[in-house]
Image (spheres, rainbow, N blue to C red):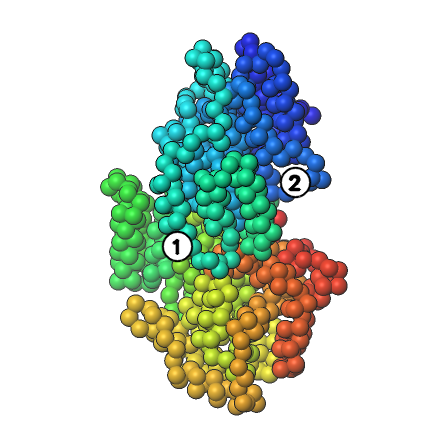
Amino acid sequence: MTRPVTAEHPAPGVVRLVLDAPPDNALTAPLRDALEAALTAALAARNTRAVLIAARGAVFSAGLPDTDDEDGRAATLGAIAALIDAAGVPVVALLPGPASGGGCELALACHYRVAAREAELCLPDIALGLPPQAGTTLRLPRLTDPATALDMMLSGRAVPSARARQAGLFDAVVDGDVDAAGLRFALGLLAEHAGPRPAPSRPLPDFRSLQAAVQRLKGALDPDGPVRARGAILDCVEAAALLPPEAALAYEAAAVEDCRDSAAHRALCHLAQAEQRVRAGMREVVDPGVPPRRIGLWGWGPGAAALGAALLATGPSVRLGAPDAAALDRAIAEVESLLDAARTAAGWDEATRVRYRSRLSGGVGPAALSGCDLLIEAGGGRMSDRQARFPDLARTAAPGAVLAATGVLASPSALGAPAGREADTLWFHLPDAVPGTRLAEIVRSPRTGPRATAVLSDLARRLERLVLVSEAESPSLGLLLGALDAADATVEAGAAPAEVDAAMQDWGMAHGPYRMADRVGLPMLLALRRRQPGGDDPEARPTLILGQLVREGRDGYLAGRGYYRYGPGGAAEPDPQVAEIAAAAREVLGAVPPRSFSQAAIQARVLAGMVQAGAAMLGRGVVRRAADLDLAAVHGLGVARWRGGPMRAADEAGLLSLRKTLRDMAAERPQGGLWDLDPLIAEAIKMGHALSRSEAPGRGALSPA
């Protein structure tokens, strides 16, 4: 096994310390120990005139690992930075590629930086609810202008080499061998008698502008917000401008520990690790080989047009299919309109738009899609009609073509069986009730083949979606149904739908469960709820309110009324008639007089509903891990990242508290056992385990590990 840091002597008096821990030179405990020892030895040598810190490979360093098995005795990045600050000779960082997190902090601690054209600097700690550390809040404002320094720390955006050079963060940007260029740079420093240049001893370039920017940004903060990191960064920068360096470093270290001990940091780390597992685990899915060159899209509404435009941007040709010429013309016109809008937003030139448009074609009838490698059903109308039409599309498709259906009520088994194409058929669910969500759920049946899963997973990745592969059910819709079950129990006991939604928005949902239901469509949700275990039992899972809304034609957002009334621009307003329907349901269920609920009680009940539904899905093997359910909630339902998803939120609130809430709800409605504690939750309580780390008892879904 090679040493993580090697010392080289490329010129008299010049020591080059090379980080050598492939693939990304992560600053693990062994590497930090080795770097501290090598740096100490180099600086102690009487003939050392300059030290270069370089890296083997295409990455300078990806920073500190997510988890580091150490006992607290390993060298810290702060201690290494302090060695560099105290060095009596120039210390130069040589960046062959990206420096992220702790890698960026190490580079910034060096006195000079020489970078390859491919290099970039990034401080992504904010995404985990942490400020930068190792003295970065002290150093960075002294190395560049206030706007660049604050943006790097608060946004987590990467700064490319050209911008870093312009901002004074790179002293040289070179093409070719960065180690050779760095040596020439160091020899030039020695020839000019240029000494060390530690950032803490440098004055702030623009103290007044920095202070003004900090105060302006502080004024925009929510003082009671759940994520402390932004405020902590601004406090640290302010402290670094006013305090002696030693005090500023201590202030930063305390702020980092304070944020590290927060619920938001734990939740954000949970999500980041789950996302990393999903992306890495996609390698388990069989390589699709040659990706589809021609995608057929049976659909003519706005949703189909949006999908068609997105597919064109991924490279293949797209052929639209519609039942008649008028529908086809509308679909093509809608796709062209979206391409025009994308050209304006993305700054495409006309040649790019023409190239995309040249890959778009269309035809009337299912036969128009017969030559496609992948066929996606995204038509309009009732799901029963769409399901009845699917076998015709499946029979038309070429042998081996992958078949995918969209829509809330799609079922791979029911769709593929009539045409004998179950092995090729999947449900491609792209949740869109919350704008900006990036989830793609690929729902397979027990007979779906690995190639179909691989083809659709690859396509979803090219659409820049987070891919979850599940068995038979949609994880995001299952969680929404759980939230609605609990919300209904709360409304049937006396709360108003608007109260429930307001409480859950305050908790961290982009929309409350009833606004979400309206967006998805009430008839489809009613049918979906009836598919659930016990869904046909009116005592176990009463749907009095939802059923009455559907009977009255209150189908949701697109119909202009559902749980809410929707005015111009889509603004939602509570509907007094829904309150009357809820009151009538209470009478039928014997839940009068109505009770009042605190906001905290509503939040606890709806969270319990999501967690109970999630545990049940995990038990059925819909997904492999509870963390997959949290990803579905965040990326599909718009749950705030700082909550970490419902399973993580239950751990944070305490599983005993969750059990009490479920017991209270079970006492209100003992029929059917809907609120009887799920065995997986009971097991987590018994064993003292985190529910969010639970796995499916059996093999589970092909959701990537």
Q: Quadrant of residue 39?
A: top right
Residue type at the position of mark 1: Ala
- The image shows residue 152, relative to residue 703, as above or below, that is above
The structure residue drawn at horizontal position 50% and vertical position 48%, both measured from the top left corner, is 232
Q: Which mark is residue 515?
A: none
Q: Residues within 10 Å of mark 2 (few under 14, many from 20)?
A: few
| Residue 601 horizontal/vertical position (percent) | 56, 74
Q: Quadrant of residue 472?
A: bottom right
- The image shows residue 264, relative to residue 80, as above or below, that is below
Residue type at the position of mark 2: Asp
Q: Secondary structure at mark 1?
A: loop
Q: Residues within 10 Å of mark 1 (few under 14, many from 20)?
A: few
Q: Is residue 469 visible?
A: no
Say whether residue 117 is left or right of residue 601.
Answer: left
The structure residue drawn at horizontal position 63% and vertical position 31%, both measured from the top left corner, is 32
Q: Which residue bears the numbered disc 1?
A: 220
